Image (tube, rainbow, N blue to C red):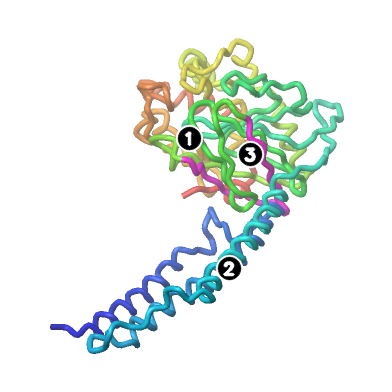
């Protein structure tokens, strides 16, 4: 029979190996990297978590080290009398009660300070040119979650007087986009987070922690990016079949580039020129405008999507985005050309590409399009908005 000491040795090495295998899950180039803060709020969280992890690590090493020492080096006392008991040692019991209590109080104090920092807001209006007029915009974005994508709404005259109580019937916004939230660098962006159906959670770890999106509530939050770049996020509250495919990106631009983006987004959709695109617009108008809005085509007559959430992505500037279907598919190839095969597959049978409760009016259904209709709609979609820069296409590419 194998000696007991051999089993202890084996378990020691297994535990040691498991400890290091655990940390192999940390990647320096991960899209959702909580260890690389890129904004003040994320840096506050990082400043709090580092000492807490250090304290927790010290406690882990003391407990694990003591356990391993007793397991590895002490005898099994099989030939000794019952060992001396320490029950009733008042000094020792006070000591191991007070020390953890002091640690918890210290952690609680610094946690409350950090929570106050990441929830506080400041007035930081910035000047924008909107249709030839200069407006003072308090950077605010309304964030709306629904199965299984995110919508971003910009009210450039501010949110005062804007009724956000019913997320399924929001007032018209100046700019409506999906999956990708474009923000200026160096500005604190206040978010108003809502949900149209079930509970979701908005999380872009490089810019701040997560904040739940709850039906019937408006949850304030904020983000800020120090440098231009693309910051990836993910819904972190299980919300149904395609929860893991409900992603988002924050695209941070220099203020001058952000102004250019505003100018582009304020333009209505272009009228198609080619015959193929014109046929695509007709097909789109007859089949797709039951849910989707294109400004200048059906924005005046839209009464909401035939879905539980009452909304589908606004496609006015579809080509100005680089992902679609909740951020899981690339719209462009690495060389900047349209990823036509994937877009056609999505139009052909979207539930096969991204699981959805299509019969329950949750997610895009199979529209039963034939190949000619698909070709025409792709041609029409290509007229909606301008292609982003190669740098943005490359930076926002998803796997």
Badge 2 element: helix
Region in magenta = 218-237
Expressed as whole percent of the image width and height from the top left, the position of residue 66 reads 43, 79
Q: Residue at x 75, y 43 (%)?
A: 257
Name which of mark 1 and mark 3 comes first in the sequence: 3
Determine contact: label 2, label 3, CB under 8 Å. Answer: no
In this rendering, position of residue 64 left or right of residue 158: left
Expressed as whole percent of the image width and height from the top left, the position of residue 43 reads 68, 57
The answer to whether one can see residue 322 in this image is: no
Is residue 133 or residue 116 the one in the foreground? 116
Q: Residue at x 48, y 30 (%)?
A: 198
Q: Residue at x 34, y 33 (%)?
A: 352
Residue 98 marker? 2
Number of other residues with Cα within 10 Å of mark 2, as a class: few under 14, some 14 to 19, many 20 or more: few
In this rendering, position of residue 243 left or right of residue 153: left
Residue marked by disc 3: 181
Q: Residue furthest right?
A: 134
Determine contact: label 2, label 1, CB under 8 Å. Answer: no
Was residue 149 drawn as part of the magenta stretch in this picture?
no
Q: Is residue 96 above or below residue 245?
A: below
Badge 3 element: strand
Residue marked by disc 1: 325
In this rendering, position of residue 50 left or right of residue 121: left
**CA distance separating discs 1 and 3:** 15 Å
Determine contact: label 1, label 3, CB under 8 Å. Answer: no
């Amino acid at each position: 029979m194998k000696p007991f000491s051999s089993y202890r040795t084996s378990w020691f090495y297994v535990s040691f190996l498991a400890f290091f295998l655990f940390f192999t899950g940390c990647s320096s180039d991960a899209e959702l990297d909580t260890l690389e803060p890129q904004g003040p709020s994320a840096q506050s969280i990082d400043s709090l978590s580092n000492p807490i992890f250090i304290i927790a690590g010290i406690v882990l090493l003391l407990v694990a080290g003591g356990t391993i020492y007793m397991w590895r080096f002490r005898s099994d006392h099989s030939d000794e009398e019952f060992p001396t008991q320490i029950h009733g040692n008042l000094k020792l019991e006070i000591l191991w009660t007070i020390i953890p209590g002091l640690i918890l109080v210290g952690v609680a104090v610094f946690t409350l300070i950090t929570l106050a920092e990441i929830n506080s807001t400041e007035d930081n209006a910035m000047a924008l040119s909107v249709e030839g007029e200069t407006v003072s915009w308090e950077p605010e974005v309304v964030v709306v979650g629904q199965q299984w994508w995110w919508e971003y709404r910009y009210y450039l005259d501010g949110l005062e007087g804007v009724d956000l109580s019913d997320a399924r019937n929001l007032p018209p916004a100046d700019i409506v986009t999906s999956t990708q939230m474009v923000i200026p660098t160096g500005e604190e962006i206040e978010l108003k987070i809502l949900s149209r159906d079930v509970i979701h959670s908005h999380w872009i770890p490089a810019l701040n922690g997560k904040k739940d999106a709850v039906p019937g509530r408006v949850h304030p939050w904020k983000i800020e990016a120090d440098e231009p770049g693309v910051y990836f996020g993910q819904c972190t509250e299980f919300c149904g079949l395609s929860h893991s495919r409900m992603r988002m990106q924050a695209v941070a631009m220099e203020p001058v580039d952000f102004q250019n983006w505003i100018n582009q987004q304020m333009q209505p959709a272009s009228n198609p020129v080619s015959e193929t695109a014109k046929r695509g617009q007709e097909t789109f108008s007859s089949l797709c405008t039951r849910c989707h809005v294109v400004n200048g085509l059906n924005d005046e007559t839209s009464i909401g999507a035939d879905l539980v959430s009452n909304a589908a992505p606004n496609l006015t500037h579809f080509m100005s985005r680089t992902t679609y279907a909740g951020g899981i598919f690339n719209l462009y190839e690495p060389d900047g050309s349209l990823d036509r095969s994937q877009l056609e597959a999505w139009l052909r049978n979207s539930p096969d590409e991204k699981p959805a409760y299509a019969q329950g009016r949750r997610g895009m259904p199979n529209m039963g399009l034939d190949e000619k209709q698909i070709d025409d709609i792709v041609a029409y979609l290509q007229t909606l908005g301008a292609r982003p820069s190669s740098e943005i296409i490359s930076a926002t590419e998803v796997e």
